């Protein structure tokens, strides 16, 4: 190597050192601070996540038991004894596992029952609650509706319930209501509406539960529950006066109303099996309402069926029918989920006696801290200042981390190649936007001189684009037609393999068309050509692989040429890496001491090595003008 070349290389290396060494130091310091901040944040995040995760896991594990205890506490507020609460808790878990329902909802329904029915003691509350929830499951009604229904029925049949026993009565009520829903195709809500409309009128007349259920259920075959209850109530209100007007007796020797079947038999004996218009008017005058006449007409049409329904309902003992209907609606998956929930409740309730004292102490400590804050406001204020200071330090560390990352990005974005690429992309986007909204731009700026000058350049491009778009439209219509024919052809084909082959051929044709004729392919080729022009500038080397479209069928032959080009490019990059340039992208790769220092240290450690001859080959030789400029810079 000549002395001039050595001096020239020494000048380049020193210049690189002067520029890159300070930048590398600053970058290293910022990266060190960012790394320390990131490590601290990771450690703090892991610690906080561990604490929060543990607290959250404990809360989630105890959540079912805590919700169950809250529900039991609501019932306890009504004065329910502990023994009754324990029985209610046990029954709720059994119900939940058996029917796949929520144990907490079971307990909360007991609150409404205890509020509606006073005097429930011992196991009566759990019996009423269990019967109500089973009936709700069997009749597809919500627990609140059935709970209200049971309360209303107890108010109507209180004397019968007390004489029979409250628990036995409510189980019979659930069984008969469930059977009525099955027999008469009604719902629990409709039965509740019917009995709410009737009230205690039928019970006051001495009519039993099974007869009332049969009558109201039969009426609901042609009307709603509330309307059925209104008709029955109108009949009961007019039956006393009707017997005098009709000359019939509808009461027994003790003055109590006869069963409905006996009354209907007497009416049939007077008017026959069917009623004429005149007879209907006479009955209306006797009973005083159209509702009562409507009930009579409906029930007289099938007294044998009514008698069978009464007999069948009268045989019901207990809530076996309701349980069968409810079990038929059980979902095994829901039952499994409820079983798991019940286990969690049981475990949580076992742990609560241990955890509750701890929670009480923590709550007491928080109350003490709150009292100290009120008593010593200055201390509280300084604690707040310290907290803000710590948060400020954390925020500053985070800001330095962000700054380090931003500095790294700006080493990339500030390079000439990145700026050229950004400019090319922006230019391409502007050209595409101008083509898309060309008509709007022409209407808005068509009279301006600059736009008219621009039209000379853009108009041919726009025309070419419109022609291409029209061709693409025709091509797309052809593709649609081919697709329609293909569908018909596929349906005609008896072999699935032949249909797959035909579909693949159509897909390959479409892929080739859109890979070579789409706007993105055309724009990519244009950008690639522009970048190749820029690459002719000395020192500029932009990778054009991003502009290449994905491989399409038939492109296998071009692989060897692409591999050769890639190998040549990698060789050029290795040569360029051997000779440092002034590109800012290499600043981060230079050690803080400078490139020249590193070379000198290396050479001093290998004094025994003698270089006889050095040759540097580049893909683009230096022009005479560039060589002259470099020599002048070396000479000073």
Image: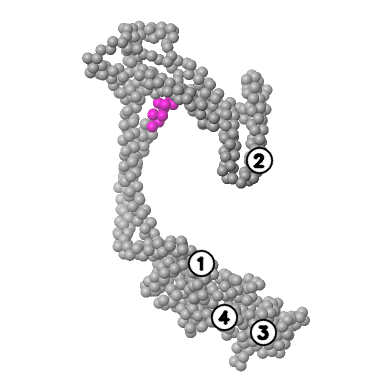
Q: Secondary structure at mark 3?
A: helix
The structure residue drawn at horizontal position 62% and vertical position 91%, both measured from the top left corner, is 252
The residues colored magenta run 405-414
Label 3 belongs to which residue? Answer: 264
| Between marks 1 and 2 in the image, the one whose residue lies nearer the viewer | 2
Residue 312: mark in rendering:
4
Mark 2 and mark 3: Cα distance apart in space: 75 Å
Q: Secondary structure at mark 2?
A: helix
99 to the left or right of 636: right
Query: Are the two marked residues, 2 and 3, in contact with CB atoms closer than 8 angstroms?
Result: no
The structure residue drawn at horizontal position 37% and vertical position 56%, both measured from the top left corner, is 59
2 or 3: tag closer to the N-terminus: 3
4 or 3: tag closer to the N-terminus: 3
Q: Would residue 370 be counted in the magenta stretch?
A: no
Which quadrant of the figure contains the C terminus? top left
Residue 329: mark in rendering:
1
Q: Position of residue 466 (x, y in %)?
A: 65, 28
Q: In the picture, residue 382 is in which quadrant? A: top left
The structure residue drawn at horizontal position 46% and vertical position 22%, both measured from the top left corner, is 565
2 or 4: tag closer to the N-terminus: 4
Query: Are the two marked residues, 1 and 2, in contact with CB atoms closer than 8 angstroms?
Result: no
Q: Position of residue 163 (x, y in %)?
A: 48, 84
Residue 19, can we see it? no
């Amino acid at each position: 190597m000549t002395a001039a070349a050595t001096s020239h290389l020494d000048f380049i290396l020193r210049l690189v050192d002067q520029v890159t060494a300070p930048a590398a130091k600053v970058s290293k310091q910022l990266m060190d601070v960012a790394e320390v901040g990131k490590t601290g944040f990771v450690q703090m995040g892991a610690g906080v996540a561990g604490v929060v995760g543990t607290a959250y896991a404990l809360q989630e594990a105890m959540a079912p038991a805590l919700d169950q205890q809250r529900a039991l506490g609501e019932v306890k507020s009504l004065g329910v004894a502990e023994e009754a609460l324990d029985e209610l808790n046990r029954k709720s878990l059994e119900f939940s596992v058996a029917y796949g329902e929520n144990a907490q909802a079971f307990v909360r329904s007991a609150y409404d029952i205890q509020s509606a029915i006073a005097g429930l003691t011992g196991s009566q509350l759990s019996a009423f609650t269990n019967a109500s929830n089973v009936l709700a499951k069997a009749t597809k009604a919500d627990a609140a509706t059935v709970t209200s229904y049971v309360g209303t029925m107890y108010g109507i049949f209180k004397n019968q319930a007390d004489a029979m026993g409250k628990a036995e009565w409510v189980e019979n009520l659930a069984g008969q209501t469930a059977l009525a829903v099955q027999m008469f195709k009604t719902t629990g809500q409709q039965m509740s509406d019917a009995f709410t409309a009737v009230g205690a009128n039928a019970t006051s007349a001495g009519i039993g539960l099974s007869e009332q259920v049969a009558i109201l259920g039969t009426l609901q075959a042609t009307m709603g529950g509330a309307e059925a209850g209104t008709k029955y109530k109108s009949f009961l209100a007019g039956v006393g006066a009707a017997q005098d007007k009709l000359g019939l007796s509808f009461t027994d020797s003790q003055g109590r109303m006869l069963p409905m079947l006996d009354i209907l038999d007497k009416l049939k004996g007077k008017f026959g099996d069917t009623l004429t218009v005149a007879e209907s008017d006479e009955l209306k005058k006797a009973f005083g309402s159209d509702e009562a006449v409507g009930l009579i007409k409906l029930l007289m049409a099938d007294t044998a069926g009514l008698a069978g329904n009464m007999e069948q309902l009268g045989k019901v003992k207990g809530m076996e029918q309701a349980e069968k209907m409810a079990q038929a609606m059980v979902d095994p998956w829901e039952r499994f989920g409820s079983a798991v929930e019940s286990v969690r409740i049981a475990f949580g309730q076992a742990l609560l006696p241990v955890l509750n004292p701890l929670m009480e102490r923590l709550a007491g400590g928080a109350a003490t801290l709150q009292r100290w804050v009120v008593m010593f406001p200055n201390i509280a204020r300084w604690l707040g200042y310290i907290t803000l200071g710590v948060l400020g330090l954390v925020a500053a560390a985070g800001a330095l981390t962000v700054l380090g990352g931003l500095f790294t990005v700006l080493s990339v974005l500030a390079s000439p190649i990145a700026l050229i690429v950004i400019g090319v992309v922006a230019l391409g986007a502007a050209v595409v936007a101008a083509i898309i909204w060309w008509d709007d731009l022409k209407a808005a700026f068509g009279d301006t001189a600059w736009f008219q000058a621009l039209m000379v350049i853009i108009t041919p491009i726009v025309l070419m684009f419109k022609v291409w778009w029209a061709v693409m439209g025709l091509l797309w219509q052809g593709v649609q037609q081919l697709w329609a024919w293909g569908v018909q052809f596929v349906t005609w084909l008896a072999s699935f393999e032949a249909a797959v082959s035909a579909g693949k051929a159509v897909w390959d044709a479409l892929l080739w068309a859109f890979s070579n004729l789409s706007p993105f392919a055309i724009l990519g080729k244009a950008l690639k050509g522009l970048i190749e022009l820029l690459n002719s500038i000395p020192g500029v080397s932009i990778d054009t692989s991003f502009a290449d479209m994905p491989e399409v069928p038939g492109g296998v032959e071009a692989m060897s040429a692409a591999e050769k080009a890639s190998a040549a490019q990698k060789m050029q990059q290795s040569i360029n890496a051997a000779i440092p340039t002034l590109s800012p992208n290499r600043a981060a790769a230079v050690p803080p001491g400078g490139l020249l220092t590193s070379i000198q240290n290396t050479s001093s450690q290998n004094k025994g090595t003698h270089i006889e001859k050095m040759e540097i080959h580049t893909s683009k030789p230096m022009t005479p003008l560039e060589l002259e400029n470099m020599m002048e810079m070396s000479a000073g």
